[in-house]
Image (cartoon, coloured by chain):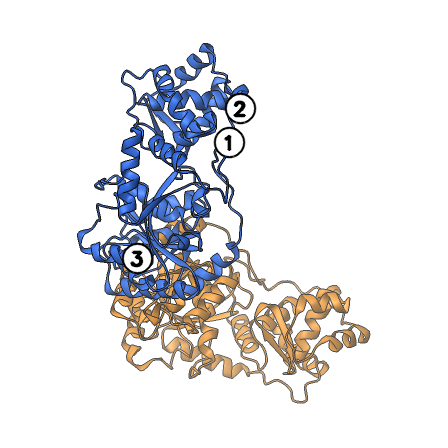
Chain colours: A orange, B blue
Amino acid sequence: MAARGVHLDHEQRRDWLRLIRTENVGPRSFRGLVNRFGGAATALDALPALARRGGGLIQPRIPTIDEAEAEMAALARLDGRFIAIGEPEYPAPLREIDDAPPLLAVRGRVELLNRPTVGIVGSRDASGAGRTMTARLARGLGEAGWMVASGLARGIDTSAHEASLPTGTIAVIAGGHDKPYPRENIALMQRIAEIGVVLTEMPMGWEPRARDFPRRNRLVSGISLGVVVVEAAERSGSLITARLANEQGRLVFAVPGSPLDPRSGGANGLIKQGASLITGVEDILEALTPLLGRSMPLALEEREHDASAMADPTEDTRSRVLMLLGPAPLPVDDIVVMSGASVSDVQILLLELELAGRLERHSGGRVSML
Amino acid sequence: MAARGVHLDHEQRRDWLRLIRTENVGPRSFRGLVNRFGGAATALDALPALARRGGGLIQPRIPTIDEAEAEMAALARLDGRFIAIGEPEYPAPLREIDDAPPLLAVRGRVELLNRPTVGIVGSRDASGAGRTMTARLARGLGEAGWMVASGLARGIDTSAHEASLPTGTIAVIAGGHDKPYPRENIALMQRIAEIGVVLTEMPMGWEPRARDFPRRNRLVSGISLGVVVVEAAERSGSLITARLANEQGRLVFAVPGSPLDPRSGGANGLIKQGASLITGVEDILEALTPLLGRSMPLALEEREHDASAMADPTEDTRSRVLMLLGPAPLPVDDIVVMSGASVSDVQILLLELELAGRLERHSGGRVSML
């Protein structure tokens, strides 16, 4: 049983890594499996049968013990280690989110992860004014005792990290620790790995692809109590971060700019939609300081296996749930209501389908069949 | 009796002018007098006695018939004329405000005053971007059929008038029609007086002083359904206009700008306080179009004298009201509650004091003794 203040032992951590690295297992299905089977080891044992019941023709590939040990060793060679959700070093706000990674691969001063954090994101081709403003905010937040998180991209991200390096900066990357990106920020990343924190949920050796960046953005907002958008064009990655931040219940701040400057379109648009207009660090502190010390609930824990709660869904329930699923994303809540099945039955059936590679999960708790 | 669609005759208009030009008579006391005495002529007759009862040592100076005729003639020589509240040409939204001028001195295409209007105000030392943005908004509003009102100042005001000159622009000035200000906008003012509208509540011959500009600003917002602040430093006249607009129930729009540019401080601050961030004319139209056609109540009308309602307050009531008044501004509503006197008794007592030059009126319906 892992709760706040409890550490996984080496085998548990290795089992967690094997489970989260298993094909078709994402943070949500990881949580469903561990909650249902009481632990990663039991879940790994149950996986083949579940995938079969979900209609998978090919068994999902589960990494071997050796493969998991090898990834842990590779990370250790970079002075990194895995932190599990529920362990005390795991960032408390991140535990709250729906699809919190069960394991974070972390390099640097891990203790910084439990200081209050603000995300700062923005355009890669930022203006001089945008970078000046970013540096001013990041410095001010650092002086006030806040960590600054960003995505290590060019432009605003770089300014945010550089200005907060002396006080505490957290770089969330979209690939493996051994695949730094972008090239021009390799030196900055190395420096952050020494006196700040670099973290990722992706495996060692993973080259970041375009679709990994939005996924990464949810972690920038997830470890933060609020996210600041400094300069962002309309339809930019920073706006995705802002949207995810909002969905996660984080405060969204935006720095206004002239409507004549397209680089301000995104931030101005966010303010129209309800984000807080900020002109200085005091605006951020005024909004976030009251949130400090608010307790964050635990989202997942290893617990004793309770076999009585684990009765499999009946064939009747299974067919009613399957009938509802199609290519159009449907909220899980609606599936529960429309099928008349119990929440736990629906969750296990969705898990089976996911493990079989037949289910896709969408934002807002929606699912569709592939 | 003057109501919507009714015109004052020449003598009535002259009496209105004499009454509003009387020392210590402002828009609020004008309304109180006309409502109490049923018309300006009767109010003029009653004035000396009222001022005496209010404790005035010197009688307020009432302009003679000849003086009023002379002002009307001087305005007519500039092709201008006086429009009374309640007359159909009087801007409908302006009737709604608490201290609507009973008479407007108007030059130009008076019929434009009853088209839907947006005020645009901003800094005198505007940036190029601010002027470009202003011109874009003013042109867009004009193309959508809206009049643009502003204050004929340098900078933003000038850009707003110039860009809306072809479609309809309204300049509200702080002095008399024969005292154009600022000098560099004399040609623009002349052009507006030909194809737009120039209006003021101030007498012919009046040189605008610093304190007349905030007073004028309430008319820019008063004739408008919404006010746009384009560029404004903190603690600027444009912010006063925005505050007055808000108090008048007008929508306040602000164009954002970089926090690094002090000329954006005021507009960004307004957005923080709840003004709508706008980036283009469509944002203004989206908010204001639903307000079109909303009926505006008449604030004042000449009516039959009803002597029965005109009993003078008793000495007891008078002393109770006077006891409450002091140098600290007090809401009239509180005076009514605390004195136990009727609303009409309190109003007539305040009127008497005002005519005697002993009462000052403040924003928010508050009064104090001088």
Judge left or right: residue A369 versus residue B122.
right
Residue A49 in the image: state x and y as whole percent.
70, 81
Q: Are marks 1 and 2 on the same chain?
A: yes
Q: Look at label 1 and name its amino acid.
A: Arg
Q: Quadrant of the C terminus of chain B?
A: top left
Residue A273 in the image: state x and y as whole percent.
47, 61
Marks 1/3 in contact by CB < 8 Å: the verdict is: no
Judge left or right: residue A315 versus residue B332.
right
Of residues A347 and B149, the one nearer the viewer is B149
Of residues B344 and A288, the one nearer the viewer is B344
**Residue that numbered label 3 is attached to:** B194
Q: Look at label 3 and name its amino acid.
A: Glu
Judge left or right: residue B135 versus residue A274.
left
**Residue that numbered label 1 is attached to:** B303
Vertical position of residue B199 compared to residue B326: above or below: below
Query: How much space separates mark 3 and mark 2, taking CA atoms?
Result: 43 Å
- Tag on residue B306? 2
Q: Which quadrant holds residue A27?
A: bottom right
Q: Which quadrant holds residue A157?
A: bottom left
Q: Earlier in the sequence, mark 1 or mark 3?
A: 3
In the displayed image of the protein, which residue is found farthest to the top?
A: B316
Query: How much space separates mark 1 and mark 3, taking CA atoms?
Result: 35 Å
Residue B12 in the image: state x and y as whole percent.
41, 34
Which residue is located at x 25 percent, y 52 percent? B153
Q: Secondary structure at mark 3?
A: helix
Q: Earlier in the sequence, mark 3 or mark 2?
A: 3
Of residues A241 and A34, the one nearer the viewer is A241
